[in-house]
Amino acid sequence: MRPIRRILAAVGEPGARRLPAAVKAAQLARALNAKLVLFRAISAPLYLDWDVSLLSTGVADVKRSARAECLAALEVLARRLRRTGIKVEVDALWIVRSCAPPPPSPTHCAARCMRCTPMCRCR
């Protein structure tokens, strides 16, 4: 069996007081001599009530700023873990959710046509 070299730990809220999953991942990383990667998936919706064109590059600036805040919070946690001798990396990425409507249901497809189209889930 190949040795475990990297452990990915998802961090829901980096500024939380207690992070039991991150603590357990750190224990595993220390025991296995592996690198720990603290990861935050940013999925917060952007509500903009004002003119986005006032920003220099629009929504990209807002997303970049939110990512930088997440990385800074993860880095605080990573520094504490590095003091114990664990190799730690941090990363945060935006999770994009599609607003497209779901494909039609198989029964809807069968009722409308005799054969399935590539868009239907029943294929």
Image (spheres, rainbow, N blue to C red):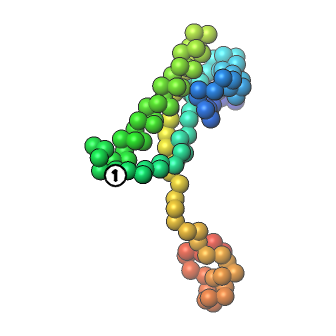
Q: Nearer the viewer, residue 6 or 59?
A: 59
* Residue at x 34%, y 52% (from the top left corner): 51
Q: Position of residue 108 (x, y in %)?
A: 66, 82
Q: Position of residue 97 (x, y in %)?
A: 53, 54
Q: Nearer the viewer, residue 99 or 62?
A: 62
Q: Position of residue 87 (x, y in %)?
A: 55, 17
Q: Amino acid at mark 1?
A: Asp
Report whether residue 40 is seen: yes
* Residue at x 66%, y 85% (from the top left corner): 110
Q: Secondary structure at mark 1?
A: loop
Q: Quadrant of the C terminus?
A: bottom right
- State the residue lying farthest toward the front: 50
The picture quadrant where one finds residue 36 is top right
Q: Nearer the viewer, residue 37 or 79?
A: 79
Report whether residue 57 is seen: no
The picture quadrant where one finds residue 4 is top right
Compared to residue 83, the image places residue 76 above or below, namely below
Q: Residues within 10 Å of mark 1 (few under 14, many from 20)?
A: few
The picture quadrant where one finds residue 8 is top right
- How many numbered discs sit on the rendered protein? 1
* Residue at x 69%, y 23% (from the top left corner): 18
Q: Position of residue 60 (x, y in %)?
A: 37, 45
Q: Quadrant of the N terminus?
A: top right
Q: Is residue 3 left or right of residue 49?
A: right
Question: According to the image, label 1 marks what residue?
Answer: 51
